[in-house]
């Protein structure tokens, strides 16, 4: 935990006498910065985030209450304690201070011993919160690395075995997420694949995703029947699911000798049949119901013929539901329009171009949902 002597306190008061008292009382124990007005305080915090703010209420220009409100709008001030210093001891003034986002309120003239005790208590709480956040951040980084380690990144081995060009990308909205994809050869002729989207985000979704991925891989290798895989997964997840989470899935098998695809959907976004000449279409399969909600569900199988150079594109709704600053979402229409142009090229370029288009559309808005994309380009039967 951080040494409290390294803590920086910002003193905001238009009275030089009050500032002098505070500086003399605290300078031996902490690092101090001073602002003689609300405007000066806001200018200071634009460059440096203190560990504690001692804030006078009545100041010319921006009042202490308004300074506090503006500070609380900044994400970096979510856990920074703000103590009001005021000669006003009415209950209404204190209530206004706490409603503005203040952490503590002390009235002038104050006892220096009490002030020092409150300052130390607030800084200790801040240091503890910072330490807990750093520990959580470390754990999330480890969880991110573990999750990304479960996802295939090198697809060259698939291309070496058969005339296919595969590429996938997973981009969690947070450190970890609930989207998934996977592709592997079940034998020399059949390429199995899956794309999924677990309800929710963060660690619970990531754990649920790991369970679902493991089960899907096992069932797909044993059964080689997408509809049956979804049925067994749904039954397993529905039996004991106290969190009431669910997962949408698209599971399929490509016969690399013929280009035929058999796939089943469990409530998933509709995949695309992308053609090199731009005549791309959504695949008209039965979307079904997400896995993990009700036991005993059955799933339909859809068959699709891929020609040489044509691509099967599966994705999660983080693509179509990406928002821009005007609260417009990317939409199915924009997705289809993006693929309605010729010469899209290899699967990696196809995926990269799509994600670049989505980011450009979002115009810097934070990613609202996890994103996964899997593109499988059929190159034709092996000679």
Image: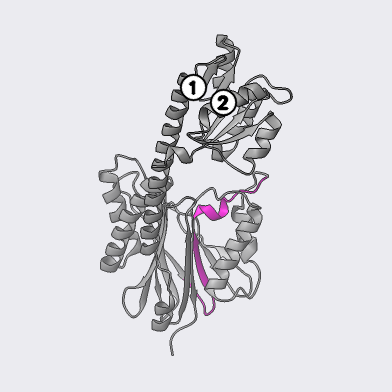
Residue 277 in percent (x, y) is at 63, 74
Say which of 103 and 142 sits in front.
Answer: 103
Report the number of numbered marks. Answer: 2
**What segment carries the magenta color?**
305-325
Coloring basis for residues: one colour
- Whether residue 55 is visible, yes or no, is yes
Quarter residue 183 falls in? bottom left
Disc 1: which residue: 115
**First in sequence: mark 2 or mark 1?**
2
- The spot of residue 332 in percent (x, y) is 59, 55
> Which residue is pictured at 63% across the width and 33% down the height?
34
Residue extending farthest top: 90
* Circle 2/circle 1 CB separation < 8 Å: yes
On screen, residue 23 above or below 300: above
Position of 43 compared to 351: left or right?
right
Distance from disc 2 to disc 1, alpha carbons, whole Å, reads 9 Å
Q: Is residue 78 magenta?
A: no
Report crowding for label 1: few under 14, some 14 to 19, many 20 or more residues within 10 A (C-alpha): some
Between 90 and 115, the one lying in front of the other is: 115
Magenta segment includes 308: yes
Q: In which quarter of the image is residue 333?
A: bottom right
Considering the numbered disc 2 on the image, is that residue within a helix, a strand or a loop?
helix
- Residue 108 horizontal side relative to residue 227, left or right: right
Where does label 2 land, which residue? Answer: 22
Tell me what residue is drawn at x 61 percent, y 73 percent.
344
Farthest bottom residue in view = 383
Residue occupying the point 58% across, 23% down = 21
Q: Where is residue 308 in the image (x, y as percent from the top left)?
A: 52, 80
């Amino acid at each position: 935990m951080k040494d409290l002597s390294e803590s920086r306190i910002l003193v905001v008061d238009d009275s030089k006498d009050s500032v002098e008292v505070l500086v003399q009382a605290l300078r031996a124990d902490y690092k101090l910065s001073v602002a003689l007005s609300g405007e000066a305080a806001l200018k200071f915090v634009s460059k440096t985030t203190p560990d504690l703010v001692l804030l006078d209420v009545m100041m010319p220009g921006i009042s202490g209450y308004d300074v506090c409100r503006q500070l609380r709008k900044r994400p970096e001030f979510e856990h920074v304690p703000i103590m009001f210093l005021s000669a006003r001891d009415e209950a209404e003034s204190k209530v206004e201070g706490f409603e503005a986002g203040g952490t503590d309120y002390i009235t002038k003239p104050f006892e220096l011993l009490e002030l020092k005790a409150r300052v130390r208590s607030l800084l200790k709480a801040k240091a503890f919160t910072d330490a807990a956040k750093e520990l959580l951040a470390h754990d999330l980084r480890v969880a991110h690395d573990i999750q990304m380690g479960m996802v295939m990144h090198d697809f060259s081995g698939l291309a070496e075995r058969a005339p296919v060009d595969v590429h996938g990308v997973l981009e969690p909205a947070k450190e970890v997420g609930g989207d998934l994809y996977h592709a592997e050869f079940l034998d020399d002729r059949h390429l199995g694949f899956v794309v999924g989207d677990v309800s929710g985000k963060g660690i619970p979704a990531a754990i649920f995703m790991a369970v679902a991925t493991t089960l899907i891989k096992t069932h797909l290798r044993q059964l080689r029947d997408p509809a049956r895989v979804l049925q067994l997964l749904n039954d397993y997840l529905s039996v004991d699911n106290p969190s009431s989470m669910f997962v949408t899935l698209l599971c399929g098998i490509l016969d690399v000798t013929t280009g035929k695809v058999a796939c089943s959907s469990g409530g998933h976004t509709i995949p695309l049949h992308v053609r090199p000449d731009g005549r791309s279409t959504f695949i008209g399969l039965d979307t079904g119901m997400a896995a993990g909600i009700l036991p005993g569900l059955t799933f339909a199988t859809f068959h699709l013929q891929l020609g040489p150079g044509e691509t099967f594109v599966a994705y999660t709704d983080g693509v179509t539901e990406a928002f821009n600053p005007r609260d417009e979402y990317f939409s199915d229409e924009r997705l289809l329009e993006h693929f309605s142009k010729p010469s899209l090229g290899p699967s990696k370029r196809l995926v990269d171009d799509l994600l670049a288009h989505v980011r450009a559309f979002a115009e810097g808005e934070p990613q609202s949902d996890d994103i996964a994309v899997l593109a499988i380009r059929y190159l034709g039967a092996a000679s």
